[in-house]
Image (cartoon, rainbow, N blue to C red):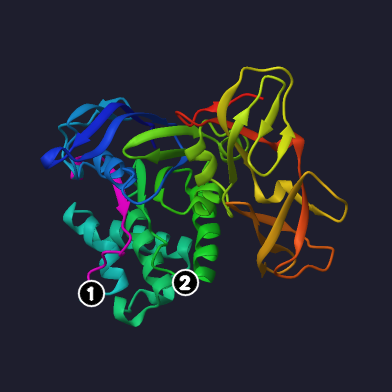
Amino acid sequence: MAKVVLKDVSKIFDKGTVGAKDITLEVKDREFAVLVGPSGCGKSTTLRLIAGLEEPTSGEIYIGDRLVNNIPPKDRDVAMVFQDYALYPHMTAYENLAFSLKLRRYSKDEIKNRVYRAAEILGIKDLLSRRPKAMSGGQRQRVALGRAIVRDPKVFLFDEPLSNLDAKLRVQMRAELKKLQNRLNATTIYVTHDQVEAMTLGDKICVLNEGKIQQIGDPLTLYNRPINRFVAGFMGAPPMNFFDGMLKENGIFETKEFSIKIADKCKELEAALGVRPEDIQIVGDDSEIKGIVSVIEPIGSEFFVHIEIGQNAITVRTKLDRELKVGDTTNLIFDPQKLHLFNRIDGSSIKL
């Protein structure tokens, strides 16, 4: 296996469209890195640049210690798994797995050994004689994974491989992917727009927006210490709640609806207060922060309670240990140890 390094990599398409801008990233040997962000953020473009399916406008890409900018995809020793599986419909699973090995002129015995090893790892030995149309979505996904495994590449690249699966199967396949990566000890770069998928899979997460890296870190760092408002709002389900207001010199954050002490003496500035749904408590006693319940969503042992505080629509994640109905006025308390503050001008995090 090998590390992957991008140094100031940019991709500008025709008509000036920015696909990636000054991407600098290191994925260590055997690390599972996830590129995550909304549609059009540059994550798939970055993956295709690593694979060699796109040429960078500027910057350098290394796989191991080798500069690969001018090396064709087939010689980069990477294997890519696509969103649509990209299986040959007229071939059996065995033939799909063996195809790339035949092109590389491996012996029949070596091809057989590699195919059956991958099939054993993925639990698809009983599918080897089937064609894709006779398989479920999850089975086709396993075959697509197997086609990458037989290559025994230095780097695995995944471009939203689970997006076509139903919710239950996605959860199952996430766990299987993580176990597979641990078993293969493979350097893996995985693209998704699903931040829950990113949090559960990644050793390292790279959050992108508008072609630029916003923050790189482990899942808990991104969740607990977001570097800006975009990362704070993107990482987390339901997303972080925000309140625009003014931070006074006495450390009181003021909005039209409430005031709350969040710091000692500080510089006065326009700011946004961020608080995650699980860090808000619905209480029976009177409090400074009040809202009106608009929707109650049961999600098993917990509830998502949607509350309107003036013009602000927020979500509270709670056990809901008291009776509550739509239209009720609620009293709320924010956990003072879990508050986030962001500059309203540039969105940067402000240390409390």
Q: In this view of the protein, can residue 204 be seen by the observer?
A: no
Amino acid type at mark 2: Asp
* For marks 2 and 1 on the same chain, the one whose residue lies earlier in the sequence: 1
Residue tagged 2:
166
Q: Is residue 326 left or right of residue 238?
A: right
List x then y, in percent, for residue 12: 18, 36
Q: In this view of the protein, which residue sits in the foreground, 167 or 96?
A: 167
Query: Which residue is painted at 40% across and 60% down in the image?
Result: 118
The kind of secondary structure element at disc 2 is loop
Q: Quadrant of the N terminus?
A: top left
List x then y, in percent, for residue 143: 36, 66
Q: Residue furthest bottom?
A: 134
- Considering the whole magenta stretch, tell me its main secondary structure: loop
Q: Residue furthest front?
A: 256
Q: In this view of the protein, which residue sits in the foreground, 279 or 189?
A: 279
Q: In this view of the protein, can residue 111 be seen by the observer?
A: yes
Quick check: 290 above or below 87?
Answer: above
Q: Is residue 262 left or right of residue 237?
A: right
Residue tagged 1:
89
List x then y, in percent, for residue 263: 72, 25
Quick check: 278 above or below 296?
Answer: above
Q: In this view of the protein, which residue sits in the foreground, 272 or 67?
A: 272
Q: Tell which tag, 2 or 1, sits nearer the viewer.
A: 2
Q: Which residues are magenta?
A: 74-88
Quick check: 121 above or below 290?
Answer: below
Q: Residue furthest right?
A: 285
Q: Quadrant of the C terminus?
A: top right
Query: Which residue is painted at 73% across and 63% down in the image?
Result: 302
What's the distance in space between the residues labelled 2 and 1, CA to CA?
Answer: 22 Å
The kind of secondary structure element at disc 1 is loop
